[in-house]
């Protein structure tokens, strides 16, 4: 049985580096969203059919507010995603599903990049966010099939990590900063896993949204 994944409505730990964010989430019993789960989250919000961790259906206005807060142009805000681009034997890989080990985030999954778009795409010739949720690679990155649109994409470079953000000019997925970079506008969205049979904190926290997924 696939676990339920509970995703927070709001981001936390603003100003932390990507590596620090992992440590802070681990302390809280949470984890950082890998890109494929983040896209599943956006896709769920796009459907308008969303339940909180208590099993209550969210009002359409609440769903729209959450989606707008994440994706609409406006005040600068960004969030870290769990993807670190590394190299082995000349091959660029995506390391993800990091867990803390002796104070360092260690990847549980590391695979060569699988057919993602390897060129920068800047609006108006960026990528379409709705198309991306339908045409992403298995790793949750834009494939070459993604339609053009108004979302920016900077392709993976060595020793960079992934973040999603929006400002007054555009929204975008960016792979241009290293794991030790920090900025007050960058935060992280906590996620937790709980099996359906488990009754725990995630089940009674109405600020968590429930989606099915893989981890």
Image (cartoon, helix red, strand yellow):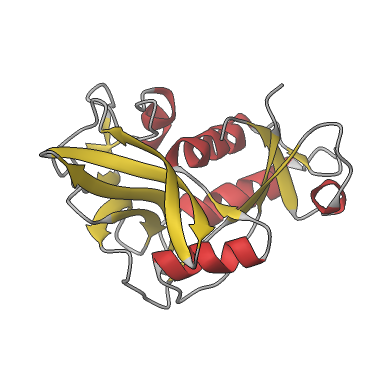
In this view of the protein, which residue sits in the foreground, 29 or 52? Answer: 29
> Closer to the camera, 159 or 175?
159
Q: From the viewer's perspective, is 195 left or right of 81?
A: right
Q: Residue at x 27, y 37 (%)?
A: 127
In this rendering, position of residue 61 left or right of residue 40: right
Q: Position of residue 49 (x, y in %)?
A: 70, 31
Is 13 above or below relative to 45?
below
Horizontal and vertical percent position of residue 50: 71, 36
> Is any part of residue 123 visible from this angle?
no
Quarter holding the N terminus is: top right
Q: Is residue 86 left or right of residue 132?
A: left
- For the C terminus, the image quarter is top right
Which residue appears farthest toward the front when viewing the image?
102
Residue 165 located left or right of residue 198: left
Q: Which residue is located at x 19 percent, y 45 percent?
A: 87
Identity of the residue drawn at 50% across and 59% down: 101
Q: Position of residue 58 (x, y in %)?
A: 77, 42
**Image point 36% across, 23% down: which residue?**
135
Q: Is residue 156 visible?
A: yes
Image vertical order of residue 201 relative to residue 104, above or below: above
Viewer-side residue, 192 vs 140: 192
Q: How many marks?
A: 0
Q: In the picture, residue 166 is in which quadrant?
A: bottom left
């Amino acid at each position: 049985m696939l676990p339920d994944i509970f995703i927070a409505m709001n981001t936390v730990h603003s100003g932390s580096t990507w590596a620090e964010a992992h440590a802070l989430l681990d302390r809280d019993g949470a984890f950082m969203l890998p890109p494929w789960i983040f896209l599943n989250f956006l896709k769920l919000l796009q459907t308008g059919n969303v339940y909180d961790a208590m099993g209550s259906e969210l009002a359409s206005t609440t769903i729209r507010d959450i989606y707008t807060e994440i994706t609409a142009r406006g005040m600068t805000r960004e969030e870290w995603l769990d993807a670190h681009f590394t190299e082995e034997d000349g091959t660029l890989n995506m390391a993800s599903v990091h867990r803390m080990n002796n104070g360092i985030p260690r990847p549980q999954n590391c695979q060569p990049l699988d057919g993602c778009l390897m060129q920068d795409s800047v609006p108006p010739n960026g990528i379409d966010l709705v198309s991306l949720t339908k045409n992403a690679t298995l790793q949750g990155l834009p494939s070459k099939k993604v339609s053009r649109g108004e979302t920016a994409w900077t392709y993976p470079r060595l020793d960079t990590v992934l973040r999603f953000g929006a400002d007054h000019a555009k929204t975008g997925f960016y792979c241009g900063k290293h794991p030790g970079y920090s900025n007050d506008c960058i935060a992280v969205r906590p996620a937790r896993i709980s099996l359906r049979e488990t009754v725990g904190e995630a089940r009674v926290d109405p600020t968590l949204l429930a989606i099915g997924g893989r981890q």
